Image (cartoon, rainbow, N blue to C red):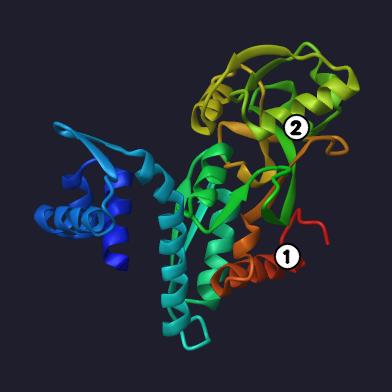
Amino acid sequence: MSSAKLRAFLAVARHGNFSAAARACGLSQPTLTTQVQALERQHKVELFHRRGHRIELSSVGLALLPIARQLASLEVEAYNLLHDSGELHTGRLRIGAVGPFHVIEMVDAYRGRHPGIELSIRLGNSADVFADLENYVIDIGVLARFHDAPGFETLHYARHAIILFVERSHPFAQRGVVALEELAGQPMLQRESGSSTRRALEAALQQAGVSPKLAMEIGSREALREAVARGIGIGAVSEAEFIPDPRICPVRIAGDPAYTETYLYCLAERRQSRLIASFFEQAAALRAAPELSGVPQ
């Protein structure tokens, strides 16, 4: 069984049709179709059900899919092993993240040490990142909180306090620090229910017995900042994600009772991959750097 035929099968499974799969592989459609058909004839199986212009994986195709993904990933690792001469001069590392802030910091540091490694970043929610790790779409996941996930290796990277931010004329703006209890009855702007920032702040408020007033639920950081700037309510954000704006002022919560954390994840079976290990090592070194504010030593 050739790796080219498996790559053709994976491309069709991923894109759902032969035309898009051929474009993604840089092949003509007849060439890619021939490779898939040859794989089917070789083993006397049907991998796809053709229904006009639409195709679906057969039961055999569904069973083959996770195996083919693992083989494709191992092929990439074998290529990297044979071509980087033991010094990580070349290779490709795919990273998934729930947000851009910490992952960009880590990628920037890694590129400085391993400039020959090609890096890509894929953003999504936590469920997307775990699914991409399990399906070998990405190699490393960067998530905003700890997940009890059997089969994965984890590295704690950073902890950052959640801060408030208000419009410049708000009474809190002149103080810089407020007690958590002072949020009782205050109009709060919240992120969507899956937000790690919202989850952490709600837990701290509940523990303190404080009940703010929900002014609005907003699904993006940009929209949240605009709403705060217009005086609609008080926003909350991880201090690592706060973007200065002349219209708003950051306000710390006394004692930093709420915080977000950043963790790296990879499949346990892949933790010893040289590329993955090198990224974890770089992240651990960056975490230990005294100048990295907010990271526990």
In the rendered view, would you say 296 is above or below 150?
below
Horizontal and vertical percent for residue 187?
Answer: 69, 14
Q: Nearer the viewer, residue 84 or 42?
A: 42
Q: Nearer the viewer, residue 50 or 265?
A: 50
Horizontal and vertical percent for residue 81?
Answer: 48, 80
In the rendered image, the quadrant that contains the C terminus is bottom right
Horizontal and vertical percent for residue 229?
Answer: 55, 25
The residue depicted at 75 percent of the width and 32 percent of the height is 200
Residue that mark 2 sits on:
200
How many callouts does the rendering have?
2
In the rendered image, the quadrant that contains the N terminus is bottom left
Secondary structure beneath dot 1 equals loop
Q: Amino acid at mark 2?
A: Ala
In contact (CB < 8 Å): disc 2 and disc 1: no
**Is residue 75 visible to us here?**
yes
The residue depicted at 65 percent of the width and 59 percent of the height is 268
Q: Amino acid at mark 1?
A: Glu
Q: Is residue 115 found left or right of 273 in the rendered image?
A: left
Q: Is residue 274 found left or right of 188 in the rendered image?
A: left
Q: Is residue 41 found left or right of 171 in the rendered image?
A: left
- Residue 291: give its label: 1
Q: Nearer the viewer, residue 74 or 35?
A: 35
Secondary structure beneath dot 2 equals helix
Mark toward the start of the polypeptide (2 vs 1): 2
The residue depicted at 57 percent of the width and 68 percent of the height is 109
What is the CA distance from the residue labelled 2 to the residue labelled 1?
25 Å
Horizontal and vertical percent for residue 6?
Answer: 32, 59
Residue furthest bottom in the image? 85
